[in-house]
Image (cartoon, rainbow, N blue to C red):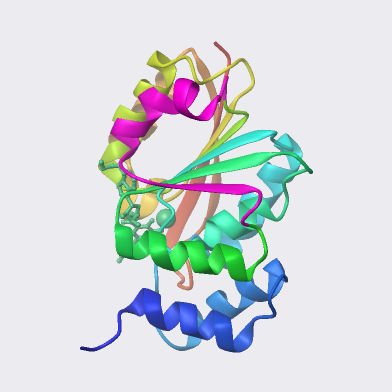
Amino acid sequence: TRSTRPQRMLKAVQKNATRGDPLSVISAIDRFCRHSEWAMNVGDEKGTILDSVVSEVNPAMALELGTYCGYSTVRIARLLPPGARLVTLEFNGDYAAIARQVIEWAGLEDMVQLVEGASGDWIPRMKEHFGVKTFDFIFLDHWKDRYLPDIKLLEECGLLRKGTVVLADNVICPGTPDYLEYIRNSPSYESNYFRSHLEYTKAEDGLEKSVYVG
Ligand SMILES: O=C(NC/C=C/[C@H]1O[C@@H](n2cnc3c(NCCO)ncnc32)[C@H](O)[C@@H]1O)c1cc(-c2ccc(F)cc2)cc(O)c1O
Ligand SMILES: [Mg+2]
């Protein structure tokens, strides 16, 4: 049967990127998505905003919801300080298998814990199962109608601390209206919108950066 887009993306990484070189993995995926087949990676333009926020936070403990093929996982993990850890949740087994290989090609498997499962099931188990106290940085890029329930779940599970930075992709396109309304009106967060474009297109999109103030 015909290969899937994630499989073709992985092939492009294995063909065009150098093992152990995260930047070459990132550019191989961006080239594939720009010149061959569009895919829903955060992309290079929003990716530089993601990079600057990760570098500023310099997280010891980071969380990503929605691994997909591992593009943003590689973008984040390459910037982590030694000893830091990125937990990324992906409940589609096919995508998780591709992402694991992309992360390994980048040589970042030691920094990344890819958990195959749903955020709703695993967020409540982060403390006892992964020894997580709180997260310093969280990247939301999974189903858009799950941003709001999952940020509330993270609060309830005590996984946020004063200063935790939550960065949300796609707050304009496809859009996360209920999440935006909540996070911008909650006294527990200081939010800023970083205007950009939908990956590999001229359409408007952006990232919402929210700092938990407790
Ligand atoms: O839909 C978009 N992203 C969704 C990502 C889903 C990935 O995350 C995984 N996932 C989902 N929910 C959960 C979950 N928990 C929730 C369920 O229990 N727990 C664990 N993993 C989860 C999926 O298996 C996928 O791997 C998107 C669309 C456009 C877009 C824009 C314009 C267009 F025209 C078309 C498309 C642009 C973007 O940047 C986008 O991110
Ligand atoms: Mg996205």
Residue 211 locus on image (x, y percent): 58, 25
Q: Give residue 163's quadrant in the image.
A: top right
For residue 169, above or below residue 181? below
* Foreground pick, 210 / 116: 116
Residue 148 visible in the current orientation: no
Query: Is 33 above or below relative to 148?
Result: below
Residue 16 drawn in magenta: no
Q: Residue at x 78, y 43 (%)?
A: 81
**Depth check: 53 or 86 in front?**
86
Q: Residue most toward the left?
A: 1
Please identify the quadrant where the C terminus is shown: top right
Q: Which residues are magenta?
A: 109-134
Q: Residue at x 64, y 40 (%)?
A: 85
Residue 73 picture location, percent across and down: 55, 55
Q: Residue furthest front?
A: 129
Residue 122: quarter of image = top left
- Could one spot residue 144 in this view of the protein? yes
Q: How many marks?
A: 0
Image quarter where ligand 1 lies = bottom left
Q: Is residue 129 magenta?
A: yes
State the residue at coordinates (42%, 23%). 154
Percent x, y of residue 14: 56, 83
x, y percentage for residue 142? Answer: 36, 48
Residue at x-position 38% and y-position 78% = 7
Q: Residue furthest right?
A: 82
In front of the other: 9 or 116: 116
Residue 1 is drawn in which quadrant? bottom left
65 left or right of 23 in image: left
